[in-house]
Image (tube, helix red, strand yellow):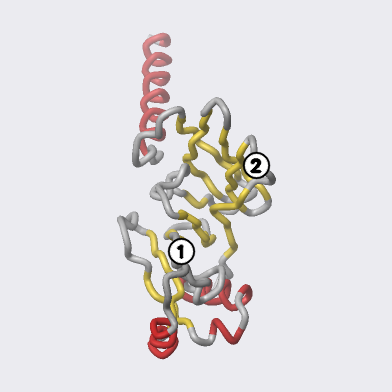
Amino acid sequence: MRPIVLAGGLFASIALSAAARADEPAPSRPPIDKCVWEKLTDKTVGLAAWAQRCDFGFRQIHFEFVGNALAIKYSDGGAPDPLVEVFDIKSSETAEAVVLRLLLERTDKAVSARCVLTPYTEGTVPAGVKRYTFSPDAAYAKELQAAANDEVPEPPCGDWGEMPDGIQYFEVPAGEGRRALFVRVGQDEPLFDEQTLRVLPKG
């Protein structure tokens, strides 16, 4: 009977491992041509992400963790460019409070005083995730509209607010991670999967 019991235990272990893998989010879309998805995880940074590794012959692209961020690296470029930054949330902070703190710490007071926290709802927002951006208040928006021309304007709320020529936002996932993200999607579909970013629990 012992071999049967061991085999049964082994089968249960395999089944549990398969179930655990099934719980892991898969990439939300196919990779682009010449690229493959790879799973990147860094417990110190506190982030797990799907990112594409690409080989276009004349240029290779991959992602790596640098400092507190997931960054993109071009073989013919310079230093890695941070696209998803990770920030700790204080024990007493709500999602809105941490995003507001991060903005105020990084934006000139004269600018942040004229911007308001707004939910970012464009596209599909994953379940259990809150996204935010900073937009001009009504009076500021009216001034900007009156001064608009054919040129691409400067970001009205600084580098951490809404962008006139790209997509970026703060993201606060639900759960035990207690970390917030700042996600720079850019103008086109990014080479990382913004829909399945996963904050890791603090070790």
Look at the picture and state if 22 lies above or below 151.
above
The relative height of residue 120 versus residue 127 in the rendered view (above or below) is below
Furthest-front residue in this view? 150
Residue 192 in sight in this render: yes
- Which residue is tagged 2? 77
Residue type of the residue flagged with mark 1:
Tyr
At x 47% / y 49%, what residue is drawn?
Answer: 198
Considering every residue shown, the one lying at the far bottom of the view is 139
Residue 199: x and y, percent?
50, 52
Camera-nearest residue between 135 and 170: 135
Q: Quadrant of the N terminus?
A: top left
Residue at image point 42% right, 75% down: 149
Name the residue located 64 percent from the left edge and 54 percent from the top edge.
68
**Relative image position of residue 88 (x, y in whole percent):** 59, 63
Residue 203 visible to an observer of this rendering: no
Q: Is residue 69 above or below residue 77?
A: below
Q: In which image quadrant can residue 57 be found? A: top right
Label 1 sits on residue: 169
Question: Are dots 1 and 2 in contact, CB under 8 Å?
Answer: no
* Label 1 CA crowd tier, 10 Å (few <14, some 14–19, many 20+): many
**Which is more foreground, mark 1 or mark 2?**
2
Q: Nearer the viewer, residue 71 or 150?
A: 150
- What's the residue type where badge 2 is placed? Gly
- Helix, strand or loop at mark 2: loop
